[in-house]
Image (cartoon, coloured by chain):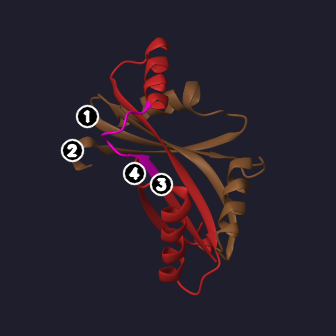
Chain colours: A brown, B red
Amino acid sequence: MYKAEITVTLRPSILDPQGKAAHHALGELGFQGIGQVRIGKLIELQIEADDATQAERIATEAADKLLANPVMEDYRIVIREASSV
Amino acid sequence: MYKAEITVTLRPSILDPQGKAAHHALGELGFQGIGQVRIGKLIELQIEADDATQAERIATEAADKLLANPVMEDYRIVIREASSV
């Protein structure tokens, strides 16, 4: 059993209204020195696979087909053995 | 300039309907061997701070006050120097 952490982030050229709202709210709360806020997704998958390579292949396919929008988003994947999590 | 990556995840005891929906959709697409899907947030902050300790203090305060819901969510913070990103 493996655990895949898929981090999906908006491409830098894409506006992030949720991040802008959080940035504004932090300013209202008195936070200083916060330059930019970007908000993405973290998707954790438990995957039954023979080895880490197969688990990464499944996670990559899931990201390409469903979890990330290839036009607006980038993703990166980290695979861990579930027993070590 | 530092970059804080704040990973916000639902506590294990909290139901994750968004994750359930993704799990169901992956099954419909023919994916096999995917045991559980949990979806959280990744918040990236750019922080002007004197050192990494101060940057982490600011990020922790932002998570506690605004970015995470302490009843339902856990968070973890990674601080990096922005030049190394």
Lower position in the chain sequence, tag 3 or tag 4: 3
The chain under label 3 reads B
Circle 3: residue type: Thr
Residue at 67% x, 34% y: name it. A70
* Chain to which mark 2 belongs: A
Residue depicted at x 60% and y 82%: B49
Asked if both marks, 4 and 2, belong to the same chain, the answer given is no
Extreme residue toward the left, this view: A83
The residue at which mark 3 appears reads as B7
Asked if residue B14 lies in the magenta stretch, the reply is yes
Q: Quadrant of the N terminus of chain B?
A: bottom right
Residue B36: x and y in percent read 35, 30
3 or 1: mark nearer the eye: 3
Side of B48 where A3 appears, left or right? left
Amino acid on which the number 1 mark rests in the picture: Met
Residue that carries the numbered disc 4 in the rendered image: B71
Residue denoted by label 2: A83
Asked if the residues shown at circle 4 and circle 1 are in contact, with their CB atoms under 8 angstroms apart, the answer is: no
Magenta span of residues: B8-16
Q: Quadrant of residue B27?
A: top left
Q: Secondary structure at mark 4?
A: loop
Do callouts 3 and 4 mark residues in contact (Cβ within 8 Å)? no
